[in-house]
Image (cartoon, rainbow, N blue to C red):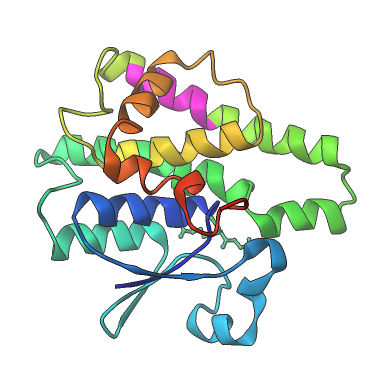
Amino acid sequence: MKLYTYWRSQATFRVRIALNIKGLAREDVVINLDRGDQLSPDYKAQNPQAVLPTLYDGDAKLFQSLAILEYLEEKYPNPPILPKDILARAWTRGFALINIADSHPLIVPRIRNYLANELKLDEAQRNAWIQHWLVAGLQAMEQLLVDKNPTGKFCHGDTPTVADICLMTQVTPAQLFKADTTPYPRVMRIYDHCMTIAAFADAHPRQQPDFPGH
Ligand SMILES: N[C@@H](CCC(=O)N[C@@H](CS)C(=O)NCC(=O)O)C(=O)O
């Protein structure tokens, strides 16, 4: 498989974790978001939305991280990243969408650039925006865990699911943008546990070869 990636792309981080869990090898092609490489004609020809990730499984092109996670689950079902029970599947998908659909889209580079260049918000105002939406997601996740699974090592059951993958990609930007994570102990316990698992730790932004300083 070939993955278009960048070290701090959270959407790509989700896919890296899923590929690792399923034991699928990949070749990385780095698209430097800080340089705006996603806007190059070459990359836009592959991904007209000009966003990461894009994944090739052989000749088949896949885009949008949630669609990619679902594809991987359907084509490579073992080990699974969705529970068997349909209500549990709906819960884990719902949990994941807090990050994928409602929180992360508000903090991506094109939004941050719009806030800076069009709305003329200064850095402090932009950081307040980012922290606000990240914390809103963390609060919702924490409350869902209080209600459903207050002591678990994973969001659901004894093995990682898409919920844990998306919990990771809620916490890492919160840490990157220095939001306070201490009010979310259940979220952070699961984050810490996932980071003891190679599939998660190896996919972490800091472990990527293109992480600055490597
Ligand atoms: N909903 C998309 C998000 C795609 C996205 O916004 N990716 C970010 C990196 S995490 C990106 O490439 N942004 C480029 C930009 O905003 O200009 C997914 O989950 O795949």
Tell me the residue at 45%/48% (across/down). 207
| Residue 34 image point, x, y percent | 69, 61
Depth check, front residue: 85 or 43: 43
126 sits to left or right of 157:
right
Q: Which residues are magenta?
A: 137-145
Image position of 45 (left or right of 69) = right
Instruction: Classify the position of ligand 1 by quadrant: top left, top right, bottom left or bottom right.
Output: bottom right
Q: Main secondary structure of the magenta part?
A: helix
Task: Look at 42% across and 26% down and name the residue there.
Answer: 141
Tell me the quarter of the picture where residue 123 sits. Answer: top right
Q: Report the front residue among 134 and 193.
A: 193
Residue 21 belongs to the span the image colors magenta:
no
Residue 194 at x, y percent in the picture: 32, 32
Q: Which part of the image, by quadrant, shows the N terminus?
A: bottom left
Horizontal side, residue 3 vs residue 171: left or right = left
- Quarter where residue 64 is shown: bottom left
Residue 91, horizontal then vertical, whole percent: 26, 35
Residue at 53%, 87% in the rendered image:
45
Position of 56 relative to 206 (above/below): below
The reply to whether residue 86 is visible in this rendering is: yes
- Give the vertical position of 138 relative to 7 (above or below): above
